[in-house]
Amino acid sequence: MGQERRQEAADFLMTSVTKGSVASYRKKQNVFDAYRCTLPLAEDPGRWFEKCTSKQHRVQEVVLFYQYLYEVRKLREVQAAGIMRGLAFCVEVEGYDVDFFHSPLVARALKACARNSKEARAYNEVKLERDKNPVSMSVLGKVREMYWANRQWTSRDDVNAKGSWLAIALGFDLGARIGNVTRADGPCQQDHSIRGIDVSFEVVNITGQTVEVKGGEALRYVITSGHLDYTTAVKGALLTLVSSKTSRSVKTQMIPKLIGRRSVAENQLLDDLLEWMMKSGTLDSDELLTRYHEGHRRTTTRKDANTALKAAAATLGLNPDKYSSKSLRGGLATAARAVKLPCDELALRGGWAIGSKTPEKFYTTLGKRGRGGMAIGAEADLINQASGVVGSILEPEGSDAHWVKLDPSRAKAR
């Protein structure tokens, strides 16, 4: 009975992290089990270090496990530390003390797992190769051209393509992780996708009053019943990321993010989003980028967005391997730096903690609602053009809005 109660407690404590994290930690526990199999029976510390006779003994066994990871598994620094963190979690949820994992000697053992100069050079070369470029307005323009413009609502493939464009455009404009605008990748992954009901619209109704309409279903009713033109009646959309990877610790994630009509590109994104809400059939309970076509329901995936982004980059002669969904968040941070957007405003938009150095360190080459990528991207492009970097922005031309090149002299004339 004692063992059953211990297991019940352990199972409950496992729910303190995501299913994906549990699976990852258990794999790390398996590495420790494999190590134990290499030891003589008399030297086995036990799966939970329960066979050790003192804290000093447990510390010694952790140090020797680090040695195994370094010499046998060829793991270095962060890799070895990751194995140890997973092991410590498994030991802790089983009800055993884990203070010995934080001993100064254990910290010293981790330092002993550092790469030598030759290994560091090889590692950094691979890291540089894997680094992603921030998305530019010209790449975004090509995505829209390929996946939205001239696509019809009568074709299933075309509607799917439109969802890919919106996933990329929203990811860039909001600075959101791609999981906030696409379907969860699998049953072990957390579902942070924004729902139709999480979007509110500022609409000028038939009486001339500005009202807030919550969700796509209500929007369709207001627009159709009032015979309104959504391109003029809707002044903005407020998107709230009710669930996100960091919403427990970073409260800026919960601040509604405005997509308005403050720039040509942002105006076009709002119209594209409205067209999606009017024609895709998305329900309030659905993920935002869900469409219904001939009785079939489908939601845009991370793969859809990555495929579209890479295809556009390749069409422009760029290396598609340098672009992924991370490029969208990086694109916002890079554009923000180019236009000297206040750091707090960027943090509010992208869901970083106020004062965080993460955007500058990992993503770049004030009002509460904040300006997004589309509101500042064109301005950033003009700054880049002045420095000799060619870019493009979204501009309506005639009755057919599409992406065109814009030179600085035309921008000043506007």
Image (tube, rainbow, N blue to C red):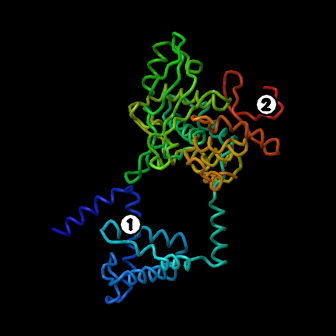
Residue 321 appears anywhere in the view:
no
Q: Position of residue 225 (x, y in %)?
A: 45, 13
For the C terminus, the quadrant is top right
Q: Can you tell which quarter of the image residue 10 is in?
A: bottom left
The type of residue carrying mark 2 is Ala
Residue under numbered circle 2 = 411
Q: Is residue 270 above or below residue 209?
A: below
For the residue pair 178 and 88, the one nearer the viewer reads as 88
Which residue is found at the position 57% from the left and 49% from the top? 325
Q: Position of residue 114 (x, y in %)?
A: 58, 76
Residue under numbered circle 1 = 89
Image marks 2 and 1: residues in contact by CB distance under 8 Å? no
Q: Is residue 396 above or below residue 390?
A: above
Name the front one of labels 2 and 1.
1
Residue 170 appears anywhere in the view:
yes
Q: Can you tell which quarter of the image residue 387 is in?
A: top right
SS assignment at label 1:
helix
